[in-house]
Image (cartoon, grey):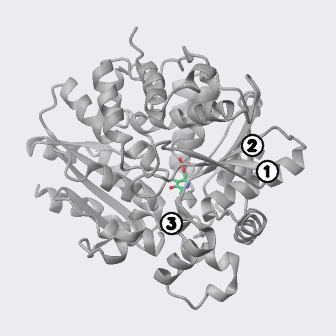
Amino acid sequence: MNLMYKSTRSAAIQVTASEAILKGLSPDGGLFVPEQIPKLDLSLSEIAKMSYQETAYEVMKLFFTDFTEAELKDCIHKAYDSKFDTEEIAVIKKADDAYFLELFHGATVAFKDMALSILPHLLSVSAKKNQINKEIVILTATSGDTGKAALAGFADVENTKIIVFYPKNGVSPIQEKQMVTQKGNNTYVVGIEGNFDDAQQGVKVMFHNKELAEKMDKAGYQFSSANSINIGRLIPQVVYYIYAYSRLLKNFEISRNEEINITVPTGNFGNILAAYYAKQMGVPIKRLVCASNENKVLYDFFRTGIYDKNREFILTSSPSMDILVSSNLERLIYQLTGEDPIQTAAFMESLATDGTYTITEEMQAKLSDFAGGFADEQKVAKTIRRIYELDGYIIDPHTAVAASVSHTYQSASGDQVKMLIISTASPFKFTRSVMNAISPKYDSMTDLTLIDELSGLSGVKVPQAIEDIRSAKVLHTTICAKDKMQEIVEEILKI
Ligand SMILES: *Cc1c(COP(=O)(O)O)cnc(C)c1O
């Protein structure tokens, strides 16, 4: 049976998985969601015997039903190969009385690789399936990690171009260096004078610009999105939750059907939503703890039922979570309304015009699967130092937000169910914040020296992706005002 996808904002739209992957966003501005969340057809004990790639196939075949077995397996094997520095692909480490799921063993040492290594292949198969003869232009706004992971995924993939916008002063120096040194004849990187939300907004406006779409069409181009709203990114993220649970089983850390809690450092709400999908597929997850940094819109939302982006935007040491509009939350809102597209569209309209909306009490009552928490900069630094001193394990600031919130959640609630903390970036991408948290003596050292210091301290080899940027040449220097994004795109595409 074919699983179809519908829009969160109107009942009229129904597309196949490959069409949803190609389009990214629904034409009505809504997000595509599966008509229902499929149940796993294997037990978790059976999955415990499988590799990451085999698990990926078992999960994705349930969602991408219009792909053949050969197509899907081909995508999976091209994505999860030796670009990852471990055969396990995702690795569980024990520290601080919790399990850390390290999702940063891919090409760009960030968790975005988990989905962005496969998206280009899913897109390319989807284009063939739908007889698309246009060149696909990937337009992406990034708060740091997505940009590089998308660039790496799409570089020199035939019939694609990728244009990445990032906030000029809103990413770490290493993140910026990673992006502006990207090779590939089809890659473009642009810094904007604004924050991540400005970049994301600019991209959204271009996606909805009919005139631009016509111009593109004439020139043989079609937009698609690599942002975490694309189901071609969301679904591959469900895989590692199922895989992680099955590894805990395999290693006798938990017993069959034992419930676990999961804390996810959250920005755009994609990663934690994937965990929620895994729970609905049958993984015994008790509670999903949504961890925010000082941009704690989601924490306030879970506490009060009011989503309100009208507040100061704070730059923190966890830039990939510096977000005031979490796009993927719309999919949860849609579920909370009982899949009512009219109500969902009204909330999103209110968000667009007033920057806020309030969900009903009935909807709020359905939020009990979630808990929210936030960590300020001081707690993040303290957590990094504490876990290093306790176990010699060094985590990056995003993961530290989650580790701090996990602690606060456990002591406030008394909930002692085993905790899986999602580790989303290598500490080597954020050496400055990480090393300063451990000791003030690193203050005077250069970023490049800190890389070696961190390696010595943690006993972890410097990842190849970090070694590479030490010597790489800057290839992208374009900077633009936040209201000039479309002009830049037209210039790049010569339209
Ligand atoms: C993107 C990102 C996040 C946030 O993930 P979402 O899916 O946007 O919630 C957290 N940490 C890091 C390092 C990231 O790159």
| Pointer 3 residue | 461
Q: Are the residues at dot 2 and dot 1 in contact (C-beta closer than 8 Å)?
A: yes
**Residue nearest the viewer, comparing 453 with 101:** 453
Q: Mark 1 or mark 3: which comes first in sequence?
A: 1
Q: Nearer the viewer, mark 2 or mark 1?
A: 1
**Residue nearest the viewer, comparing 243 with 309:** 243
Vertical placement of residue 27 versus 69, above or below:
below
| Location of residue 388 by image quarter | bottom right
Residue located at (82% from left, 37% from top): 417
Q: Which mark is residue 97?
A: 1
Left or right of residue 399, residue 175 in this image: left
What is the three-letter code of the residue carrying label 3? Lys
Residue located at (37% from left, 67% from top): 178
Cα–Cα span, label 1 and label 3: 24 Å
Vertical placement of residue 294 versus 20, above or below:
below
Q: Residues within 10 Å of mark 1 (few under 14, many from 20)?
A: few
| Pointer 2 residue | 419
Q: Which mark is residue 216?
A: none
Cα–Cα span, label 2 and label 1: 8 Å
Residue located at (24% from left, 30% from top): 125
